[in-house]
Image (cartoon, grey):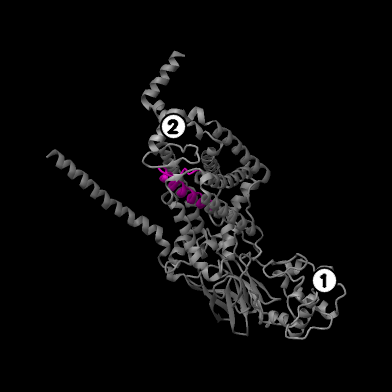
């Protein structure tokens, strides 16, 4: 009798703890994976500035405040991108990140190339892969012109898994 | 005196310190293991203790926030009394920890100490290696400067290459849509709570295993490990030449620990802290991100792998390497211990260390990267423009102006991405030069759209003069050789 009651207590104790642990785990895991929720929403239209900032035929560096930031993001919330203006209303807006491993590509107007400082990736003026290890062309933002201002759709770090 | 003794006995009766000592620090070890080769494990542990001490003190000032971390590092360097020195000790402590740990691992491998019955000691050591590298990477991120920002970007870009799970894994690592405040907090938590906690637990296990399996005896060539007899042989050895670790065998550990500590302090005082370099502002794109030395070999591999193998090798390669490392004691858990009878083991160590060193060395000057300032900073050597025609001189200007020097060197200055051009005319004919410039190929971009015809003519005319010491120019074999040519 005594033994079986002890056995029961052990089993009951284990079961009770399992339930309690599961109840604890749900909010813990949920909190930890909170970053996965609402990922689809990480896109917004961002203004890059008046059209006059971008002369036709040139590629210029533009910066914007990322629309999804926390107040303690500091400088990291300021995201650069390359704006290439082809005609009065056609643009190409490239993410700064090399498609190889994310380093910042630099524009060289003299040779018309983007070069990456990390592993030697090179792209043509239109973002096409020119040489080096990058597996694809530069990431390109969707853009629109509104009230004489250039807007792009962005908000997340572009990677091979997910463009801008 | 007698009263003191009574107090000591009273305490010991309650805390069992004597017993604890006998079964831990005072345990019996083979006299042969009191060797200079056996000091590396305790050396690694000493480094860890230094890291914990300095880390706790640094955390008193450091602010783990993306907006303030960099400023707090600058404050530590220049305002906080002795802040620079503590940062330097923490930095050099980590350098030494990785180095001594690597040596410890090599020693354990070459001395066959992973063999029966110490397989799990090796496995726990492998996890400790991963934890230490994890500390090195997360620590590099906490030094929140440009290198940290873009180094983190490289990590994210690799993770994002994971099939199917790339995007969610990236979001989990970043804690947000971009590298920012939440990302730094995550790395702070890993660096300060999660991984050190794991290390403390694993070191405890590691030491417990050293005690329960006994420290490896100094290997004798020809003496093979046989699980059926090994334990008895080891017991017999302990009986014959066993000495208590404390105080008989710890002397060399103590001496090494002392010198190690002095070496760390000296390096810290002489070389100072690492960084931070520029603030972690992604808009400051004139940066040249490079990892700390432990990750230079990886950094180099990423540039040198054939691109089509890259994703596969980045994701699978390290995993395979780690699995092989874990399996070592299960693949060769018995037999010879002495390195003198294990040529494959010795050659493997030499090959691996040589590869890592060469890759790290390449990483220090990364010949695969364009030299961004070469076109405006590296002068054209005088002897290459002396006596050239106006057209060729114009071409020399084009070569400079169109940033060819970023990838091609002249007179040893410029990029090493493409071949040096000092003797290019001895390798390529005029037609081949024109084709190469216009169409690119062999990893060179095509310049057809960015050069006017007159610029192409000029730059090719210049390159045709680049044949030092009157070497003959390259000749099209379909054309008849000019008179007098070989």
Q: Find out whether residue B134 is within the magenta segment.
A: yes
* Residue beneath disc 2: B237
Residue at image position (51%, 56%) is B184
In this rendering, position of residue B409 left or right of residue A2: right
Alpha carbon separation for disc pair 2 and 1: 74 Å
**Residue B358 seen in this snapshot:** yes
Check disc 1: other Cα within 10 Å, few if <14, some if 14-19, many if 20+: some
* Residue, far right: B387
* Residue beneath disc 1: B384
Residue at image position (58%, 33%) is B255
Q: Nearer the viewer, residue A40 or B356?
A: B356
Where is residue B352? Give x, y as percent. 55, 54
In this rendering, position of residue B84 left or right of residue A6: right
In this rendering, position of residue B477 left or right of residue A8: right
Q: Quadrant of residue B478?
A: bottom right
Instruction: Work out whether B55 lies above or below A24.
Output: above
Instruction: Work out whether B30 lies above or below A143.
Output: above
Magenta span of residues: B111-136
Q: Quadrant of residue A110?
A: bottom right
Where is residue B453? Give x, y as percent. 74, 85
**Residue B27 seen in this snapshot:** no
* Residue, far left: A1
């Amino acid at each position: 009798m005594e033994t079986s009651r002890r056995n029961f207590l052990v089993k009951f104790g284990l079961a009770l703890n399992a339930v309690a642990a599961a109840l604890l785990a749900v909010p813990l895991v949920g909190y930890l994976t909170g970053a996965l929720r609402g990922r689809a929403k990480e896109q917004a239209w961002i203004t890059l500035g008046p059209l006059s900032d971008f002369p036709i035929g040139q590629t210029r560096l533009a910066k914007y405040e990322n629309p999804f930031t926390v107040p303690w993001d500091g400088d990291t919330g300021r995201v650069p991108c390359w704006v290439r203006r082809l005609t009065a209303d056609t643009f190409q807006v490239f993410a700064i990140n090399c498609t190889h491993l994310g380093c910042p590509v630099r524009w060289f107007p003299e040779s018309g190339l983007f070069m990456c400082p990390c592993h030697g990736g090179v792209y043509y003026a239109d973002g096409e892969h020119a040489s080096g290890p990058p597996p694809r062309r530069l990431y390109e933002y969707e853009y629109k012109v509104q009230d004489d201002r250039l807007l792009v759709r962005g908000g997340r770090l572009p990677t091979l898994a997910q463009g801008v | 005196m007698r009263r003191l003794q009574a107090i000591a006995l009273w305490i010991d009766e309650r805390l069992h310190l004597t017993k604890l000592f006998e079964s831990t620090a005072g345990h019996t070890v083979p006299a042969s293991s009191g060797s200079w080769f056996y000091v590396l494990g305790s050396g690694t542990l000493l480094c860890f203790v230094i890291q914990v001490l300095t880390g706790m003190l640094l955390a008193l000032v450091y602010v783990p926030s993306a907006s303030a971390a960099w400023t707090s590092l600058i404050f530590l360097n220049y305002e906080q009394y002795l802040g620079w020195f503590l940062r330097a000790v923490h930095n050099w402590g980590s350098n030494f920890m990785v180095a001594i740990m690597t040596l410890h691992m090599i020693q354990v491998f070459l001395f066959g100490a992973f063999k029966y019955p110490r397989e799990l000691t090796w496995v726990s050591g492998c996890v400790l290696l991963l934890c230490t590298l994890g500390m090195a990477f997360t620590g590099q991120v906490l030094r929140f400067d440009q290198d940290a920002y873009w180094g983190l970007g490289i990590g994210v870009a690799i993770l994002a290459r994971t099939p199917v799970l790339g995007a969610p894994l990236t979001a989990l690592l970043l804690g947000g849509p971009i590298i920012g405040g939440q990302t730094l907090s995550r790395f702070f938590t890993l660096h300060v709570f999660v991984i050190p906690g794991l290390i403390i637990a694993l070191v405890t296990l590691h030491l417990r295993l050293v005690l329960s399996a006994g420290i490896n005896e100094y290997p004798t060539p020809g003496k093979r490990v046989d699980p059926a007899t090994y334990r008895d042989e080891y017991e017999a050895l302990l009986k014959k030449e066993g000495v208590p670790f404390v105080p008989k065998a710890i002397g060399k550990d103590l001496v090494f620990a002392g010198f190690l500590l002095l070496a760390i302090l000296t390096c810290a005082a002489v070389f100072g802290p690492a960084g931070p370099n520029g603030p972690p502002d992604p808009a400051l794109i004139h940066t040249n991100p490079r990892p700390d030395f432990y990750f230079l070999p990886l950094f180099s591999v990423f540039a040198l792998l054939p691109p089509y193998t890259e994703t596969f090798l980045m994701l699978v390669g390290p995993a395979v390497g780690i699995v092989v490392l874990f399996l070592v004691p299960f693949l060769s858990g018995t037999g010879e211990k002495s390195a003198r009878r294990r040529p494959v083991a010795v050659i493997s160590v030499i090959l691996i260390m040589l590869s890592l060193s060469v890759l790290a060395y390449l990483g220090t000057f990364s010949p695969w990267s364009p030299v961004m300032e070469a076109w405006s900073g590296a002068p054209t050597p005088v002897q290459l423009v002396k006596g050239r025609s106006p057209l060729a001189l114009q071409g020399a200007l084009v070569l400079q102006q169109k940033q060819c020097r970023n990838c091609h060197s002249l007179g040893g200055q410029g990029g090493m991405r493409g071949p040096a051009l000092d003797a290019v005319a001895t390798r390529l004919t005029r037609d081949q030069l024109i084709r190469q410039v216009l169409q690119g190929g062999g990893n060179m971009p095509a310049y057809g759209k960015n050069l006017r015809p007159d610029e192409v003519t000029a730059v090719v005319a210049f390159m045709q003069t680049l044949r030092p010491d009157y070497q003959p120019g390259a000749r099209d074999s379909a054309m008849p050789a000019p008179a007098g040519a070989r």
